[in-house]
Amino acid sequence: MRFQILGPTAVWRAGGEPVELGGPRVRALLTLLALDAGRIVTAGHLVDGMYGARPPEGVANALQSQVSRLRRALGRDRVEFHPAGYRLVADPEDVDARRFELLIRDGRQALAGGDPERAAALLRAGLDLWHGAPLADAPHAEAAAAALEELRLTATEDRVQADLTLGRHRELVAELTRLTAAHPLRERLRAQLMRALYGSGRQAEALTVYEEARKLLDEELGIDPGPDLTAAHLAVLRADPSLTPPASLTPSPHTTPAFSRSHPQADPAPPTNPRTDPAGPVRVGLRSQLTSFVGRAEELDRVGASLRDGRLVSLIGAGGAGKTRLAMEAAAREPGEVCFVPLAPVSGGVPQAVLAALDIRDALLHGHERSRIDPVDRLVAALADRELLLILDNCEHLVTETAELTDHLLAACPRLRVLATSREALGITGESVLPVTPLRLPPPEADDPLGYPAVRLFADRAAAVRPGFAVEEDNRAHVVRICHALDGLPLAIELAAARLRTLPVAEVAARLDDRFRLLTRGSRTALPRHQTLRAVVAWSWDLLTEDERRMARRLSVFAGGARPEAAERVCGLPEDVLFSLAEKSLVEYVDGRFRMLATIRAFCLERLEESGEAEEIRHAHARHYLDFMLATDPLLRTSEQLVWLARVDEESDDLDAAVRWATEAGHLELGVRLLAHSACYWWMRGHRTASAHLADGLLSALGEHRLPGMDEEFAMCVLVAAWAGGADEKLHTLLGEARVTLSLDYLPARVEFLMMLLPMYSGPPMDSDLAFRLLAEHKEDLPPWQEALAFTGQAFMLQLGGRMEEALADFERSLAAFRAIGERWGIVLVLAGLCDLRLSQADHRGALALADEALEVARELRAYTEIGEALCRRGDALAHLGDLEGARADYREAAELARMKGSMEIRAWALLGLGEAATAGGDLGTARDLLVRAREACPRSWYSTEDTLERIETALTRLDALDGESPR
């Protein structure tokens, strides 16, 4: 599609067919989106551009309605929704405004490169794209329209310059007369008209143009003509031959040929202002840096590219992220003039701060006129024809005033570019927003942490305060922990490194739980809010509205961030407040969730405790996660389980936090219910150790007390506490209590996964025939998943009774049932049973094939316990087939996985397999060590580990016989 917004808004399909757009609101919406095609445009900006200062009630719904209409016209995929706004999916070059900008850029480059003929052609082609007033269908987008008009006028000036260089003086007089009448304060147009008149033999009229301009500038602005107009006047007075150059003359891109440095006969130009002399660009306010610049090479390139492609770039990010340093480094790469304006110490009056930084003083004006010259007008007059990169640093506390000034200056000063740093974007059309994120962190197991910028920065700054410091094997873990705890924030890392003057690195790492007391000694010459970690965050906090502060402190209860709907429910505030925090860099939006950096969260948690809301908000948080798991737990045993397991993965930290808080706060019923309905997820994901600690804490808090009507939840709590493998006497007693409470004929009504887990600990019923009859009686009452699981349990009992054909039939029925449901964990369970059956029948190749299939499904599911079991079963099959190396590889992988996940029964099995392989290989010493470790690791209170324990004892007895030792 092609889009026209330089005139009435219009769209054409690829074949040239026009698209019917509809009413004025849809056209306004498309105009605003097309202006930033390919970029996200915030909803607030769209509302402002469509409705102006007085939007209607229910404006969010009104905007959504117009978006729907536009999607119907263009196609749904053409307009994308994002949490921050909407995006027109189109190549920016398919929009006439962008093509115009590119043609003008190329034309200017041709003019600067000495090819005026090509320049004139390109500039004309760009100007020919105009078909009326820009953004005509978006009447409230005045600033953007003004910027385009200014660019059009500047392009016209450049095209005139190219034509003058080509000797077309007479053709230009009438056009330039009209242009100067329409824009009487444009000094470049006046200088061009003087040159055109002189080249047409009209010297006296050229001098009259200058005199009229001088008087007008004095009366309107109280300033004298600038260097361009003054140089043109002097050249006319001297009858400078350069005013009628041959067509081959190469003009400077910044001057008229009347005072081109390259012309051999030109008189010396008038004295130049050292701040505007292109031969020696001035860099006002840029300090030479005293420290190295670490880890931002990609960001630096991205800033440079954005400054080349656009005129307004904003670096946004949390306090201490390194925005100012990045801006300074980017400015140092720029070839032209740069002016750095520090706004942090400014409490108001941004135009005056810029005037002061540029050293534009009142002495330029007549004394009686100083008071009536607006600072913004003075800036426009000073920058109208000046090529400059203006850096506005630390805008967040003056964001509205800075945005208004920037918008006005960019519209009026076509050669001006602005690089802003702030904790939120300026929100101006055409703004390129570049988030400055924390430095990249190494994973905990990284072999070379110095390959990551956060660690390199710490090492560099630490070596500066403690000569000889280096990241080495003995301190590597401490350094990585420090960088992770501080989120990779450069300022926080530098504050931590400075602490090495007085503390060893291990002590700094250990004290980071109290980071705000520890990190208090920054550079004495830094801004006060950059001297301590608390001050960095407090500066951002103080800029928030009351609702934003309320949302920020309440959001801190989320350990792993939150989706908008969860934040809205728990915090009791609309999601727009959350979006506002994201715009102000208090939270970051990552993979659909809004997260706080750990340092910001720690600060907000302090504010939550101070507010007196902590109990209420934490209860709302825990209640939300109970409701979430009540709805989600059944879905973990359906065909959609991969989606929902991934969804619960996002919430895993908060599940743990909610259970922990409920336990500590005495909300034991809430905690036990939440834990019981999280058990299936924890089992499938192999989260054994952490969940067992949570369950143990709950059981300790309960003591002898039992919650009425919660036998299932209590039993699951006991089982979770036991599954880490370290059951003591108290836990044995509780397991016995659970077995008695939930009798043989009991079918779970609330905690479905209990049907699988309880038999694993308690074993099959003594009377298998009674169990078969009960299953037959209740079959019609069982939900599909429980029915499929029941056939599996029946198959195991038949296998134990030696009824192999019947067991095989029930395994096949169970497998078919789980496959009909689409439940992968159940499929793995049945495949494991079939594999064991084949192994017992010495069908080792059949067992190997089943183990391979189980392993493939378990890996798809990311069920780590089942992955470990499948590896051990495959190792057993390979060992029986004589492939000891293959078996050892599987056992080792299973042992490492079990160690990481705390699966003691899998670790025991894997060590047993390695011990048997060592025995078969004749390495009896290694075999004994492995078998003893397997016996120590194996849980003794589980029915499911009885075979493993028996197999360990058999292997040790055989080992005794082989090495001739006496019985143990």
Image: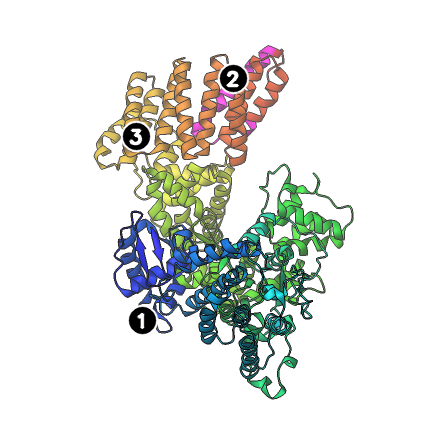
Q: Residue at x 47, y 19 (%)?
A: 876
Q: Is residue 348 left or right of residue 93?
A: right
Magenta segment: does it hold 267?
no
- Return the x and y of residue 494 as percentages of the image width and height: 67, 55
Spatial separation of the CA atoms under disc 2 and disc 1: 82 Å
Instruction: Find out whether the residues at labels 2 and 1 contact each other: C-beta distance under 8 Å.
Output: no
Residue type at mark 1 is Pro
**Front in this rendered view, residue 848 or 525:** 525
At horizontal 33% and vertical 28% (from top left) the residue drawn is 793
* Quarter of the figure with the C terminus: top right
Nearer-N-terminus badge (1/3): 1
Image color mode: rainbow
Residue under pointer 1: 56
- Which numbered tag is attached to residue 900? none
Q: Earlier in the sequence, mark 2 or mark 3?
A: 3
- Judging by the rendered image, the residue that carries numbered circle 3 is 819
Task: Magenta stretch: give its range.
Answer: 935-962
* Closer-to-camera residue (17/669): 17
Q: Are marks 2 and 3 in contact (CB under 8 Å)?
A: no
Q: Is residue 389 visible?
A: no
Disc count in the image?
A: 3
**In this view of the protein, can residue 53 be seen by the observer?**
yes
Residue 314 percent location from the top left of the image: 53, 60
Q: Is the magenta stretch mostly helix, strand or loop?
A: helix
Image quarter of residue 795: top left
Q: Report the residue marked by disc 2.
A: 954
Q: Is mark 1 on a helix, strand or loop?
A: loop
